[in-house]
Structure formats: structure tokens, C-alpha cells
Amino acid sequence: MQTLVQLMYPPRCLSCGGLVETDFGLCSACWRDTPFIAGLSCDQCGVPLPGQSDRIEHCDECLTVERPWSRGRAAIEYKDKGRRLVLAFKHGDRQDIAKPAAKWMARVTRDLVQDDMIIVPVPLHLHRHLSRRYNQSALLAEALAHELDLDWCPDALQRPRPTPTLDGKSPSERFETVSGRITVSADREELLRDRPVLIVDDVLTSGATLSAASEACWAAGASQVFVSVMARVAKGP
């Protein structure tokens, strides 16, 4: 039956739609052109760094902006094919991207795994969730939990009030907009207390949303807070 299905619906590249060997994959050309983050990267936000080092390094932004999480990882840069994949996943109903993206995230995030760690996604406000029909961060969190063999909770974090879009806002405006807008559900506080928490989101830009989520986890009694994202926005040279 599986062979028949593959003959009728052969696997397609997630990016260009060309034929590939297995489901949820990229063709060789799209794999080459996707800006995966490898080598030296910032230990707090995952942005790629030049050169090599045998020490933990931080980017200039993380040296100047206090992050309320301990360490962070990103799988790809938010540019070129990486950006197109994120936008297709987030706004184009391409939910099939979640599983391969989680595999890319697991590759860079595995060294953050702690005993008794739990994964939680950045939440959407109910109105936005209903209009989009799915929370892309929750899809990533579920798939990443499977890859890393960790517990996860889709509704540990919540947005009781809608948040205006952050597009076009300055970093300071972003932080002001989301400050205090993310909380831990009252019936989930015990689930996070005294446990290391890994927060999952699709994109890290200024870090404002992940900061609000991290502060909520700390307030609920998390023992440590880490972050993992599909893509990191990096400033140009």
C-alpha cells in the first residue's frame, strides 16, 4: 500500500516541489541554498558568528541586551530560502514543514537537553489562532519533543490579550508591546515548577516575544529557561 501511495503521490521538495527520495525533504539544490546555521554561533540566540572558537561566544546584540533565558539555538537564518520556508509554514498553511524543521532544530538543540526538561511553544492569542487555524510554534514544539524524546505542553503559555503585530516596530517598541502579555496558565504552573523549560518559536528577531515567554516561565518557578527557534533574523554586514 505504501509503495502504491508513493507511486501516486511521489515525495516532493519542501521548497521547490521537485521530486525527492523521501517525504519531508529538500532537493539537493534547495538544501545547498538553504542557510542552515552551522559552525560557531551565539550561545544565547543562535546567530552565526565568524571564525572559530573553543569557548562559548555571544554576539554583540546579546552582549548589550539582557536575555532572560540561559542559552538559545536556531536552525536556519531568516533569509533567502530560509525566509521563504518560514513564511510558507507560518502564513501559507504549509504544516508539512513542521516535522523536517524540527529535525533541523533538534540537530542544534540537542546539547541543551536537561533531565526532566519540558518543551512549551510561544502561544497565539485565541483570535489569531482561530484565523490561522493552527499555532506554528506548537507544531514545531510537538515535533521537536518527539525528536528529543521530551515532554511537551501545548497550552502552558497563553496570551490573554491580543498583541498588535510587531512588523515594522523598533526593538524597543517590540519589547514594550509584548511585555507582560504572555503568562503561564494557572492550571499549568505546577507542570513547570522546578523544571528546565525549553521555549519553542518559529523566528527570533529582537527576542522580545521570547523574553516575555521566558519571564512568564521564571515567574511560574522554572528552574532554567532555554529557547530554540526554526530561524534567526541576522543583521547584515
Image (spheres, grey):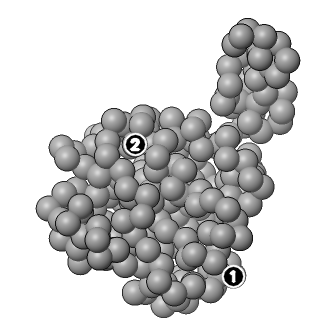
Give x and y (percent) for residue 73: 42, 51
Q: Is residue 39 above or below residue 196?
A: above
| Residue tagged 1 | 168
Residue 145's label in the rendered image is 2
Q: Which residue appears at 57% of the width and 84% of the height? A: 163
Give x and y (percent) for residue 67: 34, 72
Nearer to me, 66 or 201: 201
Q: Is residue 80 above or below residue 219?
A: above
Disc 1 packing (10 Å; few <14; some 14–19; many ≥20): few
Q: Which residue appears at 74% of the width and 53% of the height? A: 93
Quarter of the picture containing the C terminus is: bottom right
Q: Which residue appears at 73% of the width and 48% of the height? A: 94
The CA distance from mark 2 to mark 1 is: 32 Å
The answer to whether any part of residue 43 appears in the image is: no
Q: Which residue appears at 78% of the width and 27% of the height? A: 12
Nearer to me, 231 or 117: 117
The answer to whether any part of residue 22 appears in the image is: yes
Q: Is residue 116 above or below residue 217?
A: above
Left or right of 18? Residue 20 is left
**Between tags 2 and 1, which lies in front?**
2
Question: Which three-letter amino acid code belongs to the residue tagged 2?
Answer: Ala
* Mark 2 vs 1, N-terminal side: 2
Question: Which three-letter amino acid code belongs to the residue tagged 1?
Answer: Gly
Callout 2: SS: helix
Give x and y (percent) for residue 82: 68, 48
Callout 1: SS: loop
Left or right of 232? Residue 68 is left
Location of residue 19 by image quarter = top right
